[in-house]
Amino acid sequence: MGSRELEFFMWHLNYITDQIKMADNKMNFLLAIYLSLIGVVTVNIQKIFDILGKISWRYKCFFFIDLLILLGCVTGFIFLFINAVSPRIDPRKILSDENYISIIFWGDLSKVDMNEFKNIKMESFVEDLQKQILINARIAERKFNSVKNAYNVFLPTFISFLIFVIFLIFGR
């Protein structure tokens, strides 16, 4: 194995881990928006109850349906966020090897003693590097699917939130 091939594999692994970081950043952006929405609802809870006491039952039904949609979307986002943060990938299943121990992944490497570590051959490192590329590609795929689904949930959440705000402003 030449240094150019090793360099290619290292570049590929870095590229995939950068994609994972980008997915995490997108989820954090959405999390900030969702927390802001929850904050607006929480701050105005007294105003909400005051308005509910003064309006007709039709508007109350409309309000509660909107509130249920909003809560459903926020709950859906929370589950998507949890899945994006911790994608639950089992490398042993991906590689069909129940005894797989990585010499690159810190969680496995921390269990290797110093003598074992000193005896690692370059071929073993490159083979594990290829496996890590595959494992990280699966992690990136799962995270980006969660981000995509979170963006799909965002539109109904935002529309429901706008209706909620209009209700707060004009529902006197």
Image: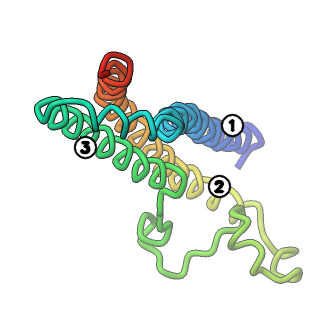
* Residue of label 1: 11
Q: Secondary structure at mark 3?
A: helix
Closer to us: mark 1 or mark 3?
A: 3
18 or 132: nearer the eye?
Answer: 18
Kind of residue at disc 1: Trp
What residue do we see at 74% from left, 72% from top? 109
Residue 108 at x, y = what percent? 68, 73
Q: Badge 2 is on which residue?
A: 129
Label 2 Cα crowd, 10 Å radius (few <14 / some 14-19 / many 20+):
many
Residue type, label 2: Leu
The answer to which image quadrant residue 151 occupies is top left
Residue at the disc numbered 3: 68
- Residue density around tag 3, few if under 14, some if 14–19, many if 20 or more, within 10 Å: few
Image location of residue 84, percent across then percent down:
49, 49
Identify the secondary structure beneath mark 2.
helix
The image shows residue 116 at horizontal and vertical percentages of 81, 81
